Image (cartoon, rainbow, N blue to C red):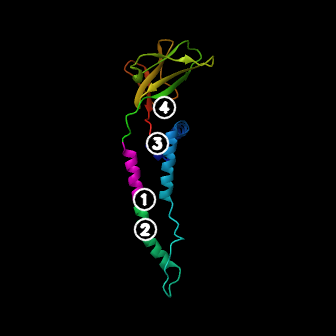
């Protein structure tokens, strides 16, 4: 999760990843708060401290100019490097801490197929047992809520008992060993 926020801060996301990031920010309050903290830290790292309030000793004959500015820069440079180093070390420690064991998250699975009479889902998180989706009124959409543990999972929809299809809304999929196609779902853990 920190990886996605870091990629956002560094402007290294492609358009699909940006959509995923925005969805995650709106959906997950903990992720939103963590991203806000990381943005605050990044802002501090990119902002030079205001030196206008620092006392300056002028000896006779000194002019405000290059010499004083040079002295202040020499004095601030180690302070800036130390601050950046501590902030970076803090980010590294924070991002590498192992989160406690996490319980499965409830995911919503939705597919549109107005001609299907029955829609099921089977995946690694169901032990490949079929789970029936419920129609959403007469809209042609079918949905199912299931607990899915953090990690990478494979699944597919089965239409009318025999036609297997991958989720058309997920970008990642792969061929299975039986001539079908499975979607790849990556469920991130909570912060």
Q: Which percent across, then down, holds residue 167?
A: 50, 25
Residue that extends furthest to the right in the rendered view of this protein? 138
User: On the image, numbered disc 2 is attached to which residue?
Assistant: 77
Q: Tell me where the magenta segment starts and ends, as one range.
A: 85-97
| Earlier-in-chain disc, 1 versus 3 | 3
Does the residue at mark 1 contact the one at mark 2 (Cβ under 8 Å)?
no
Q: Is residue 79 left or right of residue 144?
A: left
C-alpha span from label 4 to label 1: 37 Å
Near-viewer residue (41 or 46):
41
Q: Which percent across, then down, holds residue 153?
A: 41, 28
User: On the image, numbered disc 4 is attached to which residue?
Assistant: 171
Decide if residue 10 is in sight here.
no
| Earlier-in-chain disc, 3 versus 4 | 3
Task: Answer with the quarter of the image where residue 143 lies.
Answer: top right
Crowding at mark 2 (Cα within 10 Å: few <14, some 14-19, many 20+): few
Crowding at mark 3 (Cα within 10 Å: few <14, some 14-19, many 20+): some
| Residue 4 badge | 3
106 is higher (above) or lower (below) than 13: above
Q: Is residue 86 magenta?
A: yes
User: On the image, numbered disc 1 is attached to which residue?
Assistant: 84
| Earlier-in-chain disc, 2 versus 4 | 2
Does the residue at mark 4 contact the one at mark 1 (Cβ under 8 Å)?
no
């Amino acid at each position: 999760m920190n990886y996605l926020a870091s990629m956002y801060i560094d402007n290294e996301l492609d358009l699909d990843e940006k959509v995923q990031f925005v969805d995650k920010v709106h959906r997950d309050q903990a992720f939103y708060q963590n991203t806000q903290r990381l943005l605050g830290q990044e802002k501090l790292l990119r902002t030079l401290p205001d030196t206008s309030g620092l006392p300056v000793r002028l000896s006779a004959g000194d002019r405000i100019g290059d010499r004083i500015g040079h002295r202040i820069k020499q004095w601030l440079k180690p302070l800036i490097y130390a601050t950046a180093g501590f902030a970076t070390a803090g980010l590294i420690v924070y991002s590498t801490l192992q989160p406690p064991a996490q319980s499965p998250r409830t995911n919503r699975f939705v597919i549109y197929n107005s001609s299907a009479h029955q829609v099921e889902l089977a995946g690694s998180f169901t032990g490949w047992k079929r789970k029936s989706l419920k129609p959403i009124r007469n809209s042609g959409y079918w949905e199912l809520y299931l607990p899915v543990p953090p990690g990478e999972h494979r699944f597919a929809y089965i239409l009318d008992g025999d036609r297997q299809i991958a989720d058309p809304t997920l970008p990642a999929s792969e061929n299975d060993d039986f001539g079908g196609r499975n979607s790849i779902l990556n469920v991130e853990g909570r912060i």
